[in-house]
Amino acid sequence: MIKTDCHLHSTFSFDGSSDAESETVRAIELGLDCICFTEHNDYGIEDGGSFVVDTPAYRDNIIRLKEKYSGQIEILFGIEAGLQPTENVFSYFSAYLKEWDFDFVIGSSHVVNNVDPYFPEFFDDYADDDAACRAYFEEELMNASMYEDYDSYGHLDYILRYGSSGNHSFTYEKFADVLDPLLKTIISHGKCIEINSAGFRKGMDQPNPHMDILRRYHDLGGLPPTVGSDAHASEDIAADFDRTARVLLSAGFGSYSIFRKRIRSEIPL
């Protein structure tokens, strides 16, 4: 059983619906050994500052929870950095990630040209879902080439949760010319990718990333992935971790990665 959940959002994230203490209590009830909060920081999103976490208040709350629940569960301090291939966002994160003592940094791509595929109108700019996916993966390759101050690349095929066909039209072969360089770049920088169980509850029959991406990452020599539920509410903590463990084993991994103070260790499955 996977007993660490290293991708959690509380009400410190703009889209979180449960407070961090409620999520901590739920994780204890589930028998987890460790959780890592990774609140959103999507600096540079055009429609306002709500995407940037109040880091001092967030940090103070983590310290309070660590003290209150000491001996019951390990609580880690993380962030999900919304990467964009622009100089202003790169400069911002270069300074921000040096300022705070995070245990774990997820680097994620939530937008292409500042538009999130969560919104159906995103796909209006592309001939079809495949063209939209290609644009998303190409922007990820730009991000992976530009950024190195993160620990794990989050939900690598986030876009497959959305669109008219979702992941059902996906094959690795369609996008191998961009996915291979993307995975090789992540691996060459010594970074992990994340296996994110939210794909199962977002209408997919797969985690993020798709099994074919995960297998290729393994075959290329990728480090064991980090594991997260991407929960934004207490009821989703550690959701589908049994299925996630089976996927990891099927892809060839016998362990998964966890970060403390930005140092990686492995936990056997």
Image: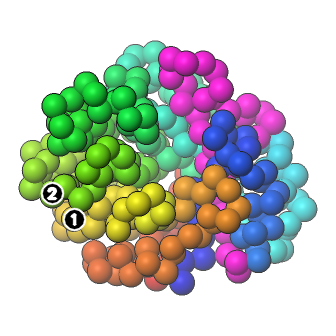
Q: Which residue is drawn at 27% across and 67% down?
A: 211
Decide if residue 27 is in sight here: yes
Which sits in the foreground, 201 or 175?
Answer: 201
Give how far apart the Cα atoms at labels 1 and 2 are.
Answer: 6 Å
Instruction: Mark yes or no: residue 187 visible.
Output: no
Q: What is the quadrant of residue 87 in the picture?
A: top left
Give residue 172's mark: 2
| Quarter-of-image position of residue 170 | bottom left
Considering the numbered disc 1 on the image, is that residue within a helix, a strand or a loop? helix
Mark 2: secondary structure: helix
Please, what is the three-letter code of the amino acid marked with disc 1? Asp
Tell whether 14 sits left or right of 18: left
Q: What stretch is highlighted in magenta?
A: 30-58
Task: Tell me: residue 56, above or below residue 160.
Answer: above
Would residue 69 be found to the left or right of residue 215 on screen?
A: right
Count of numbered tags? 2
Q: Which numbered circle lies on residue 212?
A: 1
Q: Residue at x 50, y 27 (%)?
A: 94
Q: Quadrant of the N terminus?
A: bottom right
- Mark 2 Cα-neighbour bin, 10 Å: few <14, some 14–19, many ≥20: some
